Image (cartoon, rainbow, N blue to C red):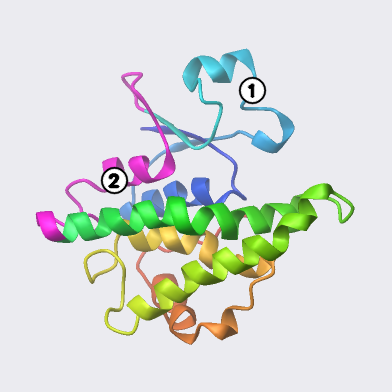
Amino acid sequence: MPTVYGLRSSGNCYKVQLLLEMLGKSYRWIDTDSTRGATRTETYLSLNPNGKVPLLVLDDGRRLAESNAILCYLAEGSPYLPATSWDRARTLQWLFFEQYSHEPYIAVARFVRRWLPETHERQAELPRLHERGANALDVMEDHLASEAFFSGGVFGVADIALFAYTHCAADGGFDLSRWPRIGAWLERVRAQPGFSPMIA
């Protein structure tokens, strides 16, 4: 039974929880609140020197960090990770997109609006975060004009990764009614067997 250290309200941690639920795998979850310093303790840093969640720990002691790397490891041999090299590469393309063009804007806008006071200096970042986040959502909307999902044309780990912060983008000030194909895709993800919502 693998152990996951994570913060349930974090999209990056939610990705791992969602895939494990869809796979029907047993796992142990250890709540680790990075917003309160739980990832900066000596004990946690001995497990993950980068001091972030999620962290997957296997029974034999092996440890794996970075949410999308964890997704690929857990999905190996399942329908959620394409078998062909081309479709797997297309899936990885969207996983990289999520971390470099999507999450840094949509997730950060959510953090600024939900966890920082209105007087905090980082509130000034919101216009740029909204602009860049909207650009990422535009790219997703365009893709969904020709394919129903992001993991080689079928539902898989890239959809889980993108769903994690897209479904709660309104928390960061994004009006998702502007992207109707994304809205329909979110419903298709929620309709997948084993789906479970984020625990706030």
Q: Residue under circle 2?
A: 72
Image quarter (top left, top right, bottom left or bottom right) of the C terminus? bottom right
Label 1 and label 2: CA atoms lie apart by 26 Å
Which residue reaches farthest right? 119
> How many dots with numbers?
2
Q: Quadrant of the N terminus?
A: top left
In-image side of 3 versus 172 (left or right) = left
Badge 2 marks a residue whose secondary structure is helix
Can residue 102 be seen in this snapshot?
Answer: yes
In terms of image quadrants, where is residue 74?
A: top left
Residue count near mark 1 (Cα–Cα under 10 Å), binned few <14, some 14–19, many ≥20: some
Of 193 and 52, which appears nearest the observer?
52
The answer to whether residue 79 shows anywhere in this view is no
On the rendered structure, is 1 left or right of 116? left
State the residue at coordinates (32%, 56%): 157
Which residue type carries mark 2? Cys
- Give the image location of residue 16, x and y in percent: 43, 47
Residue 40 marker: 1
Q: What is the x, y in percent for residue 184?
A: 44, 83
Say what secondary structure mark 1 lies in. loop
**Residue in the picture at 27% in, 79% down:** 147
Given residues 43 and 195, the one toward you in this image is: 43
User: Dot 2 surroundings within 10 Å: few (below 14), some, or many (20 or more)?
Assistant: many
Residue type beneath disc 1: Arg
Looking at the rendering, the stretch of residues picked out in magenta corresponds to 58-86
For this view, does 149 lie left or right of residue 103? left
Q: Position of residue 181 (x, y in %)?
A: 43, 84
* Residue 84 colored in magenta in the image: yes
Locate residue 79, reporting x and y percent. 20, 59
Which residue is found at the position 29% from the left and 61% from the top? 156
